[in-house]
């Protein structure tokens, strides 16, 4: 990950030398990159399908340097601007981003992406419920909507074993909302509902994943897990797993029967004391 803005000195070399445009690297690469850009924009415009790292199509990034577009499909921005990253998969050096209603490609080494533990990516409603059931009230995750590609759903652990699902809507200005309040990014929406109830019938404040997971030191295996890689942890349904690291929303690290390895969180149920 790129250094934060405070870590970039005024004497730092211009990253343009490291983020060579495809046209500067050669005609063949330029053609391939242009095709990738064109293909992604065509798919987005016709089908509404969105992509991102782990499916996160609304991650924020801080501009580390000023960038002036030289092609029509690029996005200009100033140092310190907050960009909404909408695609990080199709090109290893260029991301798609939005800024003040404008959209285009940005060089990845000009920005610092802000990851979020609460974004679960492409998981089903059932998997979301499995992760949140029996968690403390307010534990939540944001996932890509199953019924509306390119949109999001907010799943929240409520009272008892109940898990509520809220559809995150988007208006024509590109702002997000669940109820009346609108926000420029999912980040802002999540922060707002940490101090304002997301539910109408009962009071439910969103609680950070790190805080709620911090109370769980063990988990029950809900299913057998047979590893496909040596770094993964094998266990059987009913096993008790020591949780060693739950910082990654897509894979946890644990210990079972004196073995240590990684496993998907949806295979287990955290035990809270």
Image: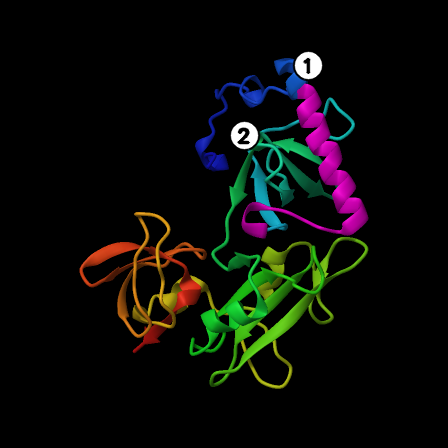
- What segment is highlighted magenta in the picture? 30-55
Measured as percent of width and height from the top left, residue 6 is found at 46, 36
The residue identified by callout 2 is 109
Which circle marks residue 27 in the picture?
1
Residue at 70% across, 65% down: 147
Residue 197 seen in this snapshot: no
Measured as percent of width and height from the top left, residue 245 is found at 32, 57
> Which image quadrant is residue 240 in?
bottom left
Q: Are marks 2 and 1 in contact (CB under 8 Å)?
A: no
Residue at 35% across, 59% down: 226
> Which image quadrant is residue 256 in?
bottom left
Task: Judge by depth and name the residue closer to the eye, 256 or 66.
Answer: 256
Which circle marks residue 138 in the picture?
none
- Name the element at disc 1: helix
Q: How many marks?
A: 2
Quadrant location of the C terminus in the rendered image: bottom left
Residue 137 seen in this snapshot: yes
Lower sequence index among marks 2 and 1? 1
Measured as percent of width and height from the top left, residue 202 is found at 58, 85
Question: In 3D space, how far apart are the residues under numbered discs 2 and 1 (Cα atoms)?
Answer: 22 Å
Whether residue 171 appears in magenta in the rendering, the answer is no
Q: Is residue 100 left or right of residue 224?
A: right
- Name the element at disc 2: helix
């Amino acid at each position: 990950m790129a250094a934060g803005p405070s870590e970039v000195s005024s004497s730092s070399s211009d990253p343009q030398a490291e983020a060579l445009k495809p046209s500067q690297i050669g005609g063949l690469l330029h053609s391939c990159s242009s095709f990738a850009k064109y293909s992604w924009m065509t798919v987005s415009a016709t089908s509404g399908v969105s992509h991102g790292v782990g499916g996160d199509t609304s991650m924020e990034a801080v501009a580390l340097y000023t960038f002036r577009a030289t092609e029509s499909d690029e996005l200009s921005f100033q140092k310190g601007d907050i960009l909404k990253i909408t695609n990080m998969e199709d090109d290893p050096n260029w991301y798609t981003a939005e800024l003040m209603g404008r959209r285009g490609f940005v060089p990845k080494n000009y920005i610092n992406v802000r990851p979020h533990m609460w974004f679960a990516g492409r998981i089903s409603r059932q998997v979301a419920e499995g992760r949140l059931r029996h968690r403390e009230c307010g534990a939540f995750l944001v996932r890509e909507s199953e019924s509306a590609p390119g949109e999001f759903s907010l799943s929240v652990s409520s009272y008892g074993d109940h898990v509520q699902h809220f559809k995150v809507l988007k208006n024509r200005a590109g702002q997000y909302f669940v109820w009346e309040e609108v926000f420029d990014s999912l980040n802002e929406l999540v922060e707002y509902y940490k101090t304002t109830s997301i539910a109408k019938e009962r009071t439910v404040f969103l609680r950070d994943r790190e805080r709620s997971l911090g109370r769980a030191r063990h988990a029950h295996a809900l299913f057998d897990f047979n590893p496909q890689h040596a770094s993964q942890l094998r266990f059987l349904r009913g096993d008790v797993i020591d949780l060693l690291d739950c910082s990654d929303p897509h894979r946890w690290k644990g210990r079972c029967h004196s073995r240590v390895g990684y496993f998907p969180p949806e295979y287990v149920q955290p035990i809270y004391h």
